[in-house]
Image (cartoon, helix red, strand yellow):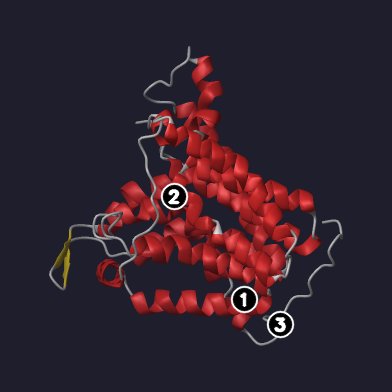
Amino acid sequence: LWVTAADASYGLPVLLWPVALAFGGSLPAGLPALVVAQVAIGGALLVLGTYGIAARIGGRLFGYVAALGWVLSPLLSLAYFYAGKREFLGLQYEDYRGLVHDTVLPNALGLTSFAGFLSLVALVIAAWLLVRCLDTGNWNDLLLSALVTGFAVGIDPANALFLPAPLLALAVARRWRQIPGFAAALLPALTTLALWRWTGRSDVAFDGISFSWSEFEANLVAFRGAGRSLLFVVWIVVAGIFAIVRKAPAKGVLVAVWFAAFFVLNSGSLQRGRVIDGSLWQLVEPGYPAFVLLVAALPLLVPGLGRRRAEARPGRQP
């Protein structure tokens, strides 16, 4: 079923108004053709965007590995989680692999109408444009990245969690003049969102994250029971962050903060989402590409491959 676009935010109506216009001003209950377009166009943008980000961090080979990782990630995620009934520390699991197969993957692959997939596409494009800016110093890339980031917040206000990532990346790269430029380019989207909520058009509120360490640990315990090795996943994240930050500090900070903002902060609030029932995965969905990039960065731990990549001079054309 399609969500009511106007109840979410102004971003979805902007994207869907041509379709609604074609159907006489309203969206029908089911739009298989639109889902196909979402998968075909959005899926291609995700693969290309993931490749583009990784290639500018560690070269074309790293880009190919990251793109391949995104393509294989659905199969790898299914292999990670347990199938069938299971009990762990008093938690009952009916069939967590089936839960991932039936609910999590369709959302991540764009086979549903939820805003998570569109948010995911928008943030990948925004991150790619910012990475280009970090290489070239091009103001057009910077402003476009900020505009796309703002539109992602317009699609889902919870995407505001992404905002610290580009700002910190610019700070690490010492692009002090571009930080206020990025912030200024966000103002139109944020102002529109504020007006949208002020007029009472939105039923979806995002009032920030109330992080609780005990609730974060509770989700970690549930994740441990659902999958094969929590310690291995933690090692992947830590090692991937180390490898990618060592290779390209500013871009690595972008990816690391992007991951932490969605996976760590959202996991610290059981009221917003839980691992045990799968509701958490819809919240962390916009951070999936960051996790794929961290996994793909593991080969950079090999001596020689992880040497810091020479940064392109500002002003150089991509």
Q: Are marks 1 and 3 in contact (CB under 8 Å)?
A: no
The residue lying toward the viewer, choosing from 211 and 273, is: 211
Q: Which badge, 2 or 3, comes first in the chain's sequence?
A: 2
Would you name the residue on which mark 2 appears? 158
Residue 245, numbered label: 1
Find numbered disc 3 in the image and state the secondary structure of the residue it sits on.
Answer: loop
Residue 50, image quadrant:
bottom right
Residue located 47% across and 66% down the image: 260
User: With respect to residue 70, does 205 lie above or below?
Assistant: above
Residue 227 position in % (x across, y down): 31, 68
Q: Identify the mark nearer the N-term, 1 or 3.
A: 1
Q: The residue under label 1 is which amino acid type?
A: Val
The quadrant in which the N terminus is found is top left
Disc 3 designates what residue?
A: 307
Residue lying furthest left: 90
The percent position of residue 108, horizontal first and vertical second, equals 44, 49
Q: How far is mark 1 from mark 3, CA to CA? A: 11 Å
Q: Quadrant of the C terminus?
A: bottom right
